[in-house]
């Protein structure tokens, strides 16, 4: 019964899109059309590879002819033009999915947004090519999962100096510590298994030790009043946080309360998954997180979609884009992707680079 209802839903969505595209087919077919509701894109937006129009080629060519690009930018612009020519000249793209594919609805919506002639055929025998968890599992065509790419980004950040690193983690993310240890031998890993964030932070940052030491010194001469300000430990420079999404909103303020500005705090990408409004990111102010430039643009526009859903749709979007690039015969492309900078090459897996960005009020100013 559930499967029948699901098939009816997919069929209903398909009919809506078919009607809007004035196309008839046994399978879903989205015609490439010039949509008047899309405003003119600027040159940088075209690097997003989000939707396609013949007008994009004119914008790229005008930019090439404008004589404002340096040699490196000119080379990238010519590659962009060549890629768009290939993508727009292909008459049909094909996508084969199972009728009960978990993300069928989202894929259909993304296809419509792409504005390309993509044909979906439903095949019961088709093996699922998308994992249930788009963030923690590797998506077909990519070298690593989004989680693993985020660990690589954190690795680059913590390798910029020789300070000892404190890693605070929950057991769900213990396996990622090994990814950090590959390049960093000076890691101190502490599992968060307490009930009180303030007490835990005080303990791991050495505040408790400082207070005990003061009491011991004071007991030697109880008649003398001593001024005391507990100091956090000085043997670490960065604190890496690998926790469940809901724990960041209490852990980061607790660490900052006891550690002040003595440490740099680096959050795992899971810190974004419990954020339902971009303004909630300010709970993590002055800490760092793996955030794409595309996501920064979203934050500046103050869009209301939860960031977890945004990352899931972004991963799905980039999977679909890889299918398009392959079928269009594109050899290489650098994409300003939703989850990060996407580096595509036809004969290898696709890489993703996610920049570490400091969360501050500046992130909200366009």
Image (cartoon, rainbow, N blue to C red):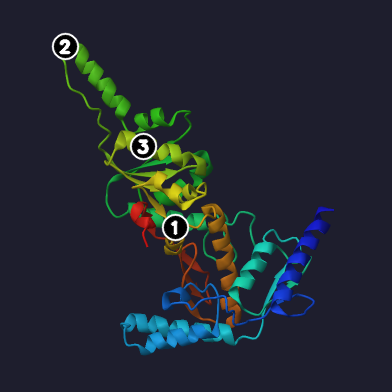
Q: Which is more foreground, mark 1 or mark 3?
A: 1
Residue 20, image quadrant: bottom right
**Which mark is first along the chain, 3 or 1?**
3
Tell me which residue sits at (60%, 71%) in the image: 113
Image point (61%, 85%), residue name: 90
Q: Left or right: 360 with respect to 14? A: left
Query: Looking at the image, which residue is at 63% across and 72% down?
Result: 111
* Residue 314, percent from left and from top: 54, 62
Q: Earlier along the polypeptide chain: callout 2 or callout 3? A: 2
- Tell me if residue 56 comes above or below residue 306 in the rendering: below
Q: Is residue 51 visible?
A: yes
Mark 2 crowd level (few <14, some 14–19, many ≥20, 10 Å Cα): few
Q: Nearer the viewer, residue 93 or 217?
A: 93
User: What residue is pinned by disc 1?
Assistant: 299
Vertical comparison of 14 with 34: above or below = above
How packed is label 1: few (under 14 Cα within 10 Å), some, or many (20 or more)? Answer: many
Residue on which disc 2 sits: 221
Of 161 and 302, nearer the camera is 302
Q: Position of residue 285 (x, y in %)?
A: 36, 47
Residue annotated with mark 3: 255
Q: In the picture shown, does residue 315 fall above or below 176?
A: below
């Amino acid at each position: 019964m559930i499967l029948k209802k699901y098939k009816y839903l997919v069929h209903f969505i398909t009919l809506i899109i078919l009607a809007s595209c004035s196309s008839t087919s046994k399978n879903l077919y989205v015609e490439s059309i010039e949509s008047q509701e899309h405003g003119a894109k600027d040159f940088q937006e075209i690097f997003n590879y989000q939707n396609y129009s013949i007008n994009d080629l004119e914008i790229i060519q005008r930019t090439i002819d404008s004589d404002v690009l340096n040699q490196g930018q000119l080379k990238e612009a010519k590659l962009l033009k060549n890629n768009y020519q290939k993508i727009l000249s292909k008459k049909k793209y094909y996508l084969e999915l199972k009728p009960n594919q978990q993300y069928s609805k989202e894929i259909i919506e993304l296809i419509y947004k792409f504005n390309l002639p993509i044909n979906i055929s439903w095949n019961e025998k088709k093996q699922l090519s998308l994992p249930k968890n788009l963030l923690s599992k590797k998506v077909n065509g990519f070298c690593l999962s989004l989680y693993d790419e985020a660990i690589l980004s954190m690795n680059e950040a913590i390798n910029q100096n020789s300070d000892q690193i404190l890693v605070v983690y929950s057991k769900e993310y213990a396996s990622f510590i090994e990814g950090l240890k590959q390049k960093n031998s000076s890691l101190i890993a502490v599992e968060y298994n307490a009930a009180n964030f303030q007490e835990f932070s005080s303990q791991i940052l050495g505040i408790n030790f400082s207070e005990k030491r003061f009491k011991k010194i004071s007991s030697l001469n109880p008649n003398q009043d001593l001024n005391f300000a507990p100091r956090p430990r000085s043997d670490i420079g960065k604190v890496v946080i690998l926790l469940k999404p809901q724990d960041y909103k209490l852990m980061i303020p607790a660490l900052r309360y006891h550690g002040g500005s003595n440490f740099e705090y680096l959050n795992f990408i899971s810190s974004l998954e419990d954020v339902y409004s971009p303004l909630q990111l300010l709970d993590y102010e002055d800490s760092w997180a793996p955030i794409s430039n595309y996501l920064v643009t979203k934050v500046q526009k103050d869009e209301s979609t939860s960031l977890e859903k945004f990352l899931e749709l972004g991963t799905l979007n980039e999977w679909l884009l890889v299918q398009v690039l392959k079928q269009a015969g594109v050899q290489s492309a650098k994409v300003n992707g939703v989850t990060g900078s996407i580096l595509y090459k036809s004969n290898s897996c696709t890489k993703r680079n996610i920049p570490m960005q400091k969360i501050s009020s500046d992130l909200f100013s366009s």
